[in-house]
Image (cartoon, grey):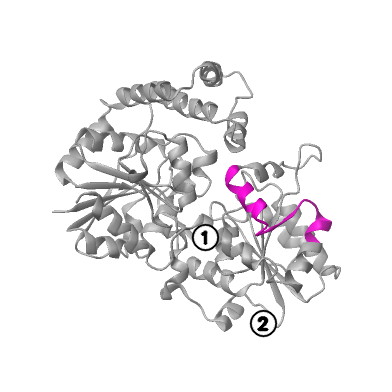
Amino acid sequence: MKKLGIVITDGVGFRNFVMSNFIGEAVQQFDSVTLYSGLSISAYKDVSDPKIIIKELDVYVESKLVWFFRKWKEVAHLHKHKSFYGMKDNLETGYPKNNSPRALLVKLIYCCTHLVHSDSSILLAEKLQFLFFSKNKITQSYLELLKEDQPTHLFFTHQRPPFLAPFLYAAQQLRITTSTFIFSWDNLASKGRMLGAFDYFLVWSHLMQSELLYFYPKATKEQVKVVGTPQFEPYVMPKYQTKAEEFYQKFDLNANWKTICYSCADVSIGANDPIVIKAIANAIRNNGIEKKIQLIVRTSPAEDDSRFRSIREEFPEIIWNVPKWLLTRENHAESWSQRIPSEEDIKDLRSLLEYVDLNINMCSTMSLDFMLFDKPVINTVFGNPKNGLYNDQRFLDFGHFKKVVDSQSVSIAKNEMELINQINEALNTPNQRAAERKTMIELQVSEPLKGTSKRIATTLANFND
């Protein structure tokens, strides 16, 4: 029998693998499917197939020793690859600013890994990390759970969350074949180490495949499969489609005017969002934009819209789309991870992608979302080390985004004047960068959106043949 275990870690994983076609396709390829969930089991009320079992994972909390060696391997990985700007930036921003006991330990780790950061030292740190949680009661409960279920394959829908390392360890101890999906386009070239060693890897593109083989030289090309990404599959699923008139009616928009969508980052990197939104709103009021324009702002699903309250009061004409993500579990250490999207929100997002005329965002993956619908995109980076704003211009040098900049598939606005000029240009000549947008999508997502879930499920099934 082929028995698949799927590890869902958070709301984005839920969106990508539960709200796409993936679960239905997995049921076709495997005799049974078990969802091991980091979310509350209440999130799965719409999953009703009798072949699917849902089990809520106990929450693992690291001990100090486990944290120490996990941190060691992650910082060593960043040191090893600090020639990549994103790695270097994360290394610098992660250095402690105070001298608390934990901060001093992190500084010690930085000092030691600056001198020693070979692959063998990273693997030794990981071995010690795993050793110190191997006897933990949660780890032991994971072992018992997997012994009872006996999956033939365990698929992790995210490669990084450290609290899943004991679950991976349990699978390794029981010789269960494991795989992981590389979660996002920036993860390999700018983030820290994966949570552990997997047998197989699923990636978005041939670009991502080459990146993984570079950063993890022990992996072979046969272990890294290009499958595309389910992140965008809802955009070709009929259940999420909305008619144009329904879109304009829902958001109270004028169908005869052009529509700009500004999509916000979360508060951790989106400090300049209010400045950009005000710049656009003022340009509309002052007729700086040559066409009749309406602005809709979509906030980040990771937060509510409270930080924009003053802007909402100052510019009542702005239309707001606050993502309808539902909190599934209270009092969680990472409450943002416990929010899942509603079906209504995926419909809202898809309708924005299809019916607005221009997207503006700060170097977000939303650039790809809008490119999939062949819409022009402007990336705003108003901040630099000299002007006192949050320095978002540094993201232009991150490996994943430098490819976007160099491709000229988007325009880059570093100040208000550039932004307004680029808005007028994009609205007057929306097809100007169409060829570049198509090339960028082919680079970042190497497989068609239709059939993504079937492709992933078939690939997983073939791993055990």
Answer left or right for 97 relative to 152: right
Q: Which mark is residue 255?
A: 2
Up-down relation of residue 436 to residue 132 (above or below): below
Between residues 422 and 19, which one lies in front from this camera angle?
422
- The mark nearer the N terminus, 1 or 2, is 2
Between residues 211 and 229, which one lies in front from this camera angle?
211
Residue carrying label 1: 442
Image quarter hosting the N terminus: bottom left
Up-down relation of residue 99 to residue 398 (above or below): above
Q: Residue at x 49, y 25 (%)?
A: 76
The amino acid at mark 2 is Ala
Answer left or right for 373 relative to 44: right
Between residues 322 and 454, which one lies in front from this camera angle?
454
Q: Residue at x 60, y 18 (%)?
A: 99
**Most extreme residue toward the left, as rendered?**
1
Up-down relation of residue 442 to residue 5 (above or below): below
Identify the element where label 2 is drawn.
loop
Q: Nearer the viewer, mark 1 or mark 2?
A: 1
Q: Is residue 406 magenta?
A: yes
Q: Quadrant of residue 64?
A: top left
Which region shows up in magenta? 399-420
- Give coordinates of residue 98: x percent, y percent: 62, 21
Q: Residues within 10 Å of mark 1 (few under 14, many from 20)?
A: some
Identify the element where label 1 is drawn.
helix
